[in-house]
Image (spheres, rainbow, N blue to C red):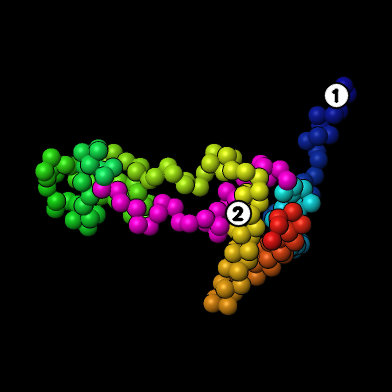
Amino acid sequence: MSKLEPEAKRQKVDLTKDQNGPPKKSSPVKKTEPKEKKKPSVSVTLENLSELNFRKQDHLVYELSVRWNYALPPWPPLDFDYSAKLRELGLRRVEAQRFRAEVEVENGLRKAAEVEGFSGQFRDSEGKLHDLRPREGCPCISNFEQMPLEELQRLVMRAYEHQLQDMHDLKAKHNQYDRVYELDLVRQLQGKIKKLARIVEP
């Protein structure tokens, strides 16, 4: 290394300074506005109808499980009497609004109140939850899997038709809804009904 190199480095001129005055202010960096991102397409693809096979049980079970309330009676039944099951557990039913005011034990039965919004499920004073909903007629996958293929096809068709009618009723009653989703869902339901109608006998 040459001995002159350190001296040369010390003699480097700072370009941001005026040799005869104070340092010059560097010019501000111009901010570039970020480019506006393209908005994604508003089209909603719910599922590929061509992949749906109404002759396969697992396809039918899934289609029914996500819309069973359009084809089957309400569950648990609205008029189901839970008093017998409560007595078997040593419980009695009290109104949730009066739960704290009610005595803990009456006629040998401890108090329990139905959980708001969850029919057939009761909570006692210890906080324990008791699910007393009837297992008969439960709209669950294990029960759907035991149904004959023809019954599943009929129930799925009924669910499609009732769901489509519900969409039309909702549109007539309300002005605020997701228009894009609604149109796509209606198209999907109409396509499914048309495809399933080739199999299900009227």
View extreme (top): residue:
1
Q: Is residue 165 left or right of residue 13?
A: left
Amino acid tagged 1: Lys
* Any part of residue 124 in sight: no
Q: Of 156 and 120, which appears nearest the observer?
A: 156
Mark 2 or 1: in front is 2
Q: Quadrant of the N terminus?
A: top right
Is there CB contact under 8 Å for labels 2 and 1?
Answer: no
The quadrant in which residue 106 appears is top left
Q: Nearer the viewer, residue 181 or 112?
A: 112
Q: Position of residue 150 (x, y in %)?
A: 66, 48
Please rate how many residues cluster around mark 2, counting C-alpha atoms within 10 Å: few if below 14, some from 14 to 19, many from 20. many
Which amino acid lies under the numbered mark 2 shown in the image of this protein?
A: Leu
Pointer 1 local density, CA inside 10 Å: few below 14, some 14–19, many at least 20: few
Identify which residue is drawn at 77% across, 48% down. Answer: 51
Q: Which residues are magenta?
A: 55-83
- What is the quadrant of the C terminus in the image? bottom right
Q: In this rendering, would 84 be left or right of 23? A: left
Location of residue 111 in the rendering, given as x and y in whole percent from the top left corner: 19, 45
Q: Which residue is mark 1?
A: 3
- Of all residues, the one furthest to the right in this rendering is 2
Query: Gap in Å between the C-alphas at discs 2 and 1?
Result: 95 Å
Q: Is residue 137 visible?
A: yes
The picture places residue 132, in percent across and down from the top left corner, at 34, 43
Label 2, on which residue?
155
Q: Residue at x 53, y 41 (%)?
A: 143
